[in-house]
Image (cartoon, rainbow, N blue to C red):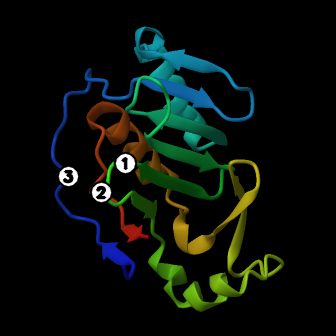
C-alpha cells in the first residue's frame, strides 16, 4: 500500500473534556504504568504538560497494553506521534504517523538509512532504538499536545494535524 496523507482539517470536532478512552499508560523510560482506574485528571494534565518538555510514553486503548496504542515521543523541540492498531485475524494492521509536510522531499533519503544526515532525522528514538525521521515529527508542540489529549479522550486521531498512513 502506498503511503496515504491525511491532511489536517480546519474544523476539529468537540469532545467530552472529561472522557477517557485510554485504558493503560506506560512511560517507556521509567516503566511507570497506570491502569484504567489510575488514569486521573491529574495524570492526564501531567502528560499534556510533558509533551512540550519531553516525554516518551505509550497510550493504550487496550487495557492489557498490547495491540492498540499511540506512541508519544518529544524532546521539547520535535514531537512524534505513532498510532498502531494490530490485529490477530486476517485484517491488515494499521500504522499512522504524525506528518510534517516540510520534510516531504526527504522520503527517498529515509530509505537510504543514513542516520547521520541531520536534515532528515530527529534525535527521537522509538522504543529506545529506532530513530524517527523528521517527516514523522512535528514542531508545533501546542497542536501536538491537542492531538495527545484528543487521543486520550476519544481514542481517535486528532484532525487538527496532518497524518500519514503507512504499511
Label 2, secondary structure: give it: loop
Observer-side mark, 3 or 1, equals 1
Compute the Cα span from label 3 to label 2.
29 Å
What residue sits right under mark 2 in the picture?
91
Compute the Cα span from label 1 to label 2.
6 Å
N-term-proximal mark, 3 vs 1? 3
The answer to the question of whether label 1 and label 2 lie on touching residues, with beta carbons closer than 8 A, is yes
Q: Quadrant of residue 90?
A: bottom left
What residue sits right under mark 3 in the picture?
12
What residue sits right under mark 1 in the picture?
87
Location of residue 139 in the rendering, given as x and y in whole percent from the top left corner: 55, 62
Compute the Cα span from label 3 to label 1.
28 Å
Which numbered tag is attached to residue 157? Answer: none
Image-based side of 109 in relation to 22, left or right? right
- Circle 2 packing at 10 Å, graded few (<14), some (14-19), many (20+), is few
Image-based side of 73 in relation to 95, left or right? right
53 or 63: nearer the eye?
63
Label 1, secondary structure: give it: loop
Observer-side mark, 3 or 2, equals 2
| Placement of the C terminus among the 4 image quadrants | bottom left
Location of residue 146 in the rendering, given as x and y in whole percent from the top left corner: 38, 44
112 or 11: nearer the eye?
112
Q: What residue is drawn where x is 60% and y is 20%?
A: 33
- Circle 3 packing at 10 Å, graded few (<14), some (14-19), many (20+), is few
Outermost residue toward the right in this view: 116
Q: What residue is drawn where x is 36% and y is 79%?
A: 1
42 or 93: nearer the eye?
93
133 or 11: nearer the eye?
133
Amino acid at each position: 500500500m502506498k503511503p496515504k496523507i491525511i491532511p489536517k482539517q480546519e474544523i476539529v470536532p468537540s469532545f467530552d473534556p472529561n472522557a477517557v478512552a485510554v485504558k493503560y499508560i506506560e512511560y517507556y523510560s521509567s516503566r511507570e504504568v497506570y491502569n484504567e482506574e489510575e488514569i486521573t485528571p491529574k495524570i492526564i494534565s501531567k502528560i499534556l504538560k510533558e509533551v512540550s518538555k519531553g516525554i516518551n510514553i505509550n497510550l493504550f486503548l487496550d487495557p492489557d497494553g498490547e495491540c492498540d496504542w499511540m506512541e508519544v515521543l518529544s524532546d521539547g523541540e520535535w514531537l512524534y506521534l505513532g498510532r498502531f492498531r494490530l490485529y490477530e485475524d486476517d485484517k491488515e494492521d494499521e500504522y499512522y504517523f504524525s506528518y510534517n509536510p516540510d520534510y516531504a522531499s526527504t522520503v527517498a533519503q529515509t530509505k537510504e538509512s543514513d542516520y547521520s544526515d541531520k536534515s532528515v532525522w530527529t534525535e527521537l528514538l522509538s522504543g529506545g532504538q529506532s530513530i524517527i525521521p523528521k517527516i514523522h515529527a512535528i514542531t508545533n508542540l501546542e497542536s501536538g499536545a491537542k492531538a495527545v489529549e484528543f487521543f486520550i479522550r476519544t481514542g481517535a486521531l486528532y484532525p487538527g494535524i496532518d497524518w500519514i498512513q503507512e504499511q
